[in-house]
Image: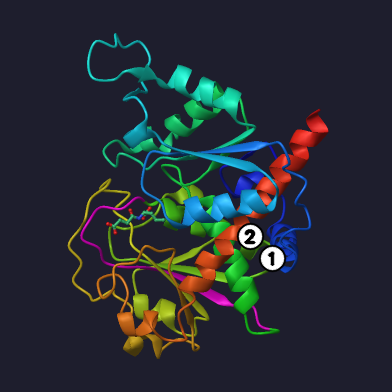
Amino acid sequence: MKQFFSVRDIDSISAIVKEALELKANPFAHEDLGRRKTLGLVFLNPSLRTRMSTQKAALQLGMQVMMMNLNQDGWALETQDGVVMNGSSVEHIREAAAVMGTYCDVLGLRSFPGLQDREQDYSEWLFKKFRDYSRKPLVSLESATLHPLQSLADVITILEHQKPGVKPKVVLSWAPHVKPLPQAVANSFSEWMCQAKKEGLVDFVIAHPEGYRLAESFTTGAKQTTDQREALEGADFVYVKNWSSYDDYGGILPVKEAWMLDQQQLKITNQAKVMHCLPVRRDLELASDILDSSDSLVIAQAANRVWSAQVVLKRLLTDLKTDL
Ligand code: SN0
């Protein structure tokens, strides 16, 4: 593996989940693989789970880890070419990424979308520039359009908690929010679920209000509906997540129906387990009585972030070794 940006960077979901569960059973089995290798985690936006789980995963592989909150601690970054830097930006991404590439063997980058210009965000220009200028294998710690480490942890959690012998019905259900959030978590979950469906592992439905459809490139193969009730019927897993509009890009549109999942709606499901990537706003996105019940998998999901990061780092490190 040379980068981890999307589901397209892996061959088989069942194979990578199996490998992740082997690491979960035996976290220190490869503690020498990352010896004398350095991981640099670069953040342009806040993070709790990604930061801590990826660091823990790297340490368990014997790596050294450096963190950089580039927006807070670094020089003001210029990301555009052809700019005379006589304003507030101090350092160009060309030099900043290249320098960090000389210090690190593997890099990770978190960068949210601006949510102003859809084409620009969906071109993933920042991730690509950082990858190209750093000249090192790059892991997405959530980019403008995708969050693959989260989705891998989500698939691990679903396959661990599924009822034996039945193909689970998984529903991605839009939730209300007060702020325009990226589509990244939803796009990414959908992309991974569509691939899991192809591998015969799950059935997958997306439920969202009018105006909230996701980009087609990430939803091919998914059933989509604006009827939340219909989607929830017989569901085994409900993944709750807000995203802003893709069509009315970055917008928050008026929604008449009550989309926040609560115990009442859960009754239509097949005793579904409820998922959310966190952070979650209680009683806005998801009812606190669900979060506080045994129906919630949110902590198990967050715990599995370690194994999703560790399997990805393990594969990147293995390829570094074979390059030598
Ligand atoms: C991010 C998102 O992409 O939805 C990160 C999720 C892992 N979530 C937020 O920015 C939440 C912000 C808020 O104010 O609730």
> Which range is magenta?
166-182
Q: Secondary structure at mark 1?
A: helix
| Of the pair 290 and 25, the residue shown nearer to us | 25
Callout 2 touching callout 1 (CB < 8 Å): yes
Residue 318 among magenta residues: no
Q: Main secondary structure of the magenta part?
A: loop
The kind of secondary structure element at disc 2 is helix
Q: Residue 225's x, y, as percent?
A: 39, 68
Residue 210 visible in the shown view: yes
Q: Position of residue 58 (x, y in %)?
A: 63, 48
Residue 225, compared with residue 33, is above or below; it is below
Residue 313 percent coordinates (x, y) = 66, 46
Under mark 1, the amino acid is: Lys
Q: Residue at 44% across / 63% down in the picture?
A: 277
Q: Earlier in the sequence, mark 2 or mark 1?
A: 1
Point out the image quarter for the C terminus.
top right
Q: Is residue 279 left or right of residue 296?
A: left
Quarter placement of the N terminus: top right
Task: Kindly identify the amino acid type of the residue bearing the numbered disc 2.
Answer: Trp
Left or right relative to 241: residue 41: right
Q: Position of residue 70 (x, y in %)?
A: 39, 34
Q: Where on the picture, by quarter, is residue 259?
A: bottom left
Q: Residue at x 70, y 50 (%)?
A: 61
Residue that badge 2 annotates: 307
Residue carrying label 1: 24
Q: Is residue 170 magenta?
A: yes
Which residue is drawn at the image coordinates 20% and 60% (left, top)? 178
**Mark pair 2, 1: CA separation:** 6 Å
Residue neighbourhood size for the residue with mark 2, other residues' Cα within 10 Å, grouped as few (<14), some (14–19), many (≥20)? many
Quarter of the view holding residue 286: bottom left
* Vertical position of residue 37 compared to residue 85: above or below: below
Can you tell me which quadrant of the image ligand 1 is in?
bottom left
